[in-house]
Image (spheres, helix red, strand yellow):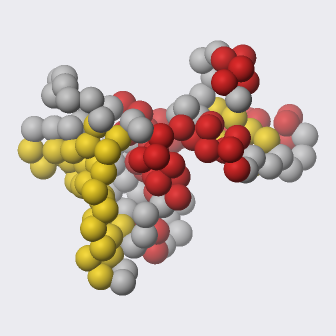
């Protein structure tokens, strides 16, 4: 898998018929945006490109119904976001699309995430070692996750 990631040299978007198990985990850990599609690449690559470009543009925007799609800075280096509405409603964006670009930028010390459940992709991020985190179950429909960067350097602005 390390050779395959090296071969992809700088690519951060991966599309395939089926991506599961170790391959999926390694791609996620390496920071890839993973897409699964059936059909011929010429039929879906323009769509993937458009969605990736839109995702990059949405990081600081609000979605349908005024749902905040990007974390809000509460104090210096400390951010907060609730992805409960994203998880509960079909607002046209996933929790991964809302959070992953922010996480990849790495310009935070702590990120508090309120959610209904820990998204599997976020669990992979925690296991990947880039972040440490505390998960606190508030009740049967609410979980608080506090992520911190594994390195000890403060946020650079």
Write the residue at 66% across / 24% down: 2
The front one of 77 and 69 is 77
Q: Position of residue 128 (x, y in %)?
A: 47, 40
Write the residue at 48% across / 72% down: 89
Write the residue at 42% across / 70% down: 117
Vertical order, 128 against 114 (above or below): above
The front one of 111 and 71 is 111
Vertical order, 126 against 30 (above or below): below
The front one of 68 and 6 is 6
Q: Is residue 113 visible?
A: yes
Q: Position of residue 57 (x, y in %)?
A: 45, 37
Q: Is residue 18 left or right of residue 117?
A: right
Furthest residue to the bottom?
140
Point out the image quarter for the N terminus: top right
Q: Is residue 62 left or right of residue 155?
A: right
Q: Is residue 58 visible?
A: no
Q: Position of residue 95 (x, y in %)?
A: 46, 56
């Amino acid at each position: 898998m390390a050779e395959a990631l090296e071969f992809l040299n700088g690519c951060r978007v991966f599309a395939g018929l089926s991506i599961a198990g170790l391959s999926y985990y390694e791609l996620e850990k390496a920071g890839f945006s993973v897409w699964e599609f059936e059909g011929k690449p010429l039929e879906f690559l323009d769509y993937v490109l458009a969605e990736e470009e839109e995702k990059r543009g949405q990081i600081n925007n609000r979605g349908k119904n005024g749902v905040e799609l990007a974390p809000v800075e509460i104090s210096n280096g400390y951010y907060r976001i609730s992805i409960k509405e994203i998880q509960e409603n079909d607002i046209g964006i996933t929790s991964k699309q809302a959070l992953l670009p922010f996480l990849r930028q790495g310009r935070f010390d702590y990120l508090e995430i309120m959610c209904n459940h820990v998204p599997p992709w976020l669990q992979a991020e925690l296991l990947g070692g880039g972040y440490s985190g505390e998960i606190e179950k508030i009740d049967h429909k609410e979980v608080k996750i506090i992520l911190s960067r594994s390195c000890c350097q403060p946020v650079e602005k």
